Image (cartoon, helix red, strand yellow):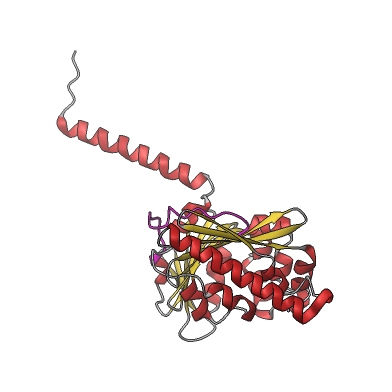
Amino acid sequence: MRFHLHPFQLATALLVLCGAILGGLYWMRRDRAMSPAELVALLPGRAGTVVYLDFASARRLGLLRLLNGSDAEQDADYREFVARTRFDYQRDLDAAAILFAGGEEFFALRGRFDWKSLAAYAEQQGGVCQGGMCRMSGSRPERRISFYLEQDDVLDLAVSTDGEAVRQIHPGKARLSDKPTGAVWVKTSAQAITASGLLPEPAKPLLASADRTRPIVFTLSPRGAGLVLGVQLDCQDSPAATQLEAQLESGTAALRAALAQQNGAAANQASLGAMLASGTFHCERNRVRGEWPLPVQFLAMLGEGGAN
């Protein structure tokens, strides 16, 4: 007896097969850790400052001790958060991709999360969890926090005036060209840095030479017993890059001379000014690269409360 497959049966079989393939791809994706580029690509494709933090590397390098004070100095609210959610970024967070844009903050976090504890904490704080997404108030009325579990080891979180801003975080191709490197990777612009008001005084002459809108990428990577801070600045063309390189070298030389005149032989090698004066630069076509060694003395100074 010959078996005849009707068109309806064939269509059903194809749908089941496609579903099985897509389901397999989905679970393969869930079973492997997202790459740095994939984590950054989750963020909304908007203008702003993008930060990637490799917490696993930072733990090995001891950088978290510089970012976090002693247990006694930790905020009481944070200690309560850790106790109730069983989540401590120093222990449980492996990587974070963050976008700061227009007063809003978006986070794609990779690590180990206890979703039931996180949801219970949100509800204890007067929040609501529905359809896998939680919403709650932040430290101020205009700060609304929303979060959900992208996959077992990836948590999406947003802080915004929009109580459902976390919906803007989803897989995309907008930033797949960004491939974070080093323990810390920051993509920003001179305009964004200046607007933040966080630029140290000794660094202002150096940044004044950069194009205000083109991307600037900073990296922090281990080297020997210390670290090295790297920068990558894109220019309009090769002549512009050559000019920028000369301006940065000139600004660094002027800073070095000013420090020598001010401090003489007793210059503080752990100071921010001395670190900036140690910068070196070179251009590659339309791109300028620079780096500043961060010696052990400088890192120790940061750990004690800052470098002057």
Residue that appears at 76% across and 81% down: 262
Is residue 95 rendered to the left or right of residue 43?
right
As drawn, 238 above or below 168: above
Q: Please give the count of numbered marks on the rendered protein.
A: 0
Residue that appears at 68% across and 70% down: 277
Q: Is residue 174 magenta?
A: yes
Q: Is residue 219 magenta?
A: no
Can residue 79 be seen in the rendering of this structure? yes
As drawn, 215 above or below 195: above
What span is in magenta? 168-184
**Residue 250's image quarter?**
bottom right
Residue that appears at 40% across and 62% down: 236
Q: In which quadrant of the rendered image does the N terminus lie? A: top left
* Residue 27 rendering spot, x and y as whole percentages: 45, 44
* Residue 101 rendering spot, x and y as whole percentages: 44, 73
Can residue 307 be seen in the rendering of this structure? no
Residue that appears at 18% across and 25% down: 5
User: Residue placed farthest to the right in the image?
Assistant: 266
Q: In which quadrant of the rendered image does the C terminus lie? A: bottom right
User: Residue placed farthest to the bottom in the image?
Assistant: 141
Give the overall secondary structure of the magenta segment. loop
* Residue 225 rendering spot, x and y as whole percentages: 78, 56
| Front one among 86 and 257 | 257
| Front one among 307 and 303 | 307
As drawn, 173 above or below 248: above
* Residue 240 rendering spot, x and y as whole percentages: 44, 63
User: Residue placed farthest to the top in the image?
Assistant: 1
Is residue 202 rendered to the left or right of residue 3?
right
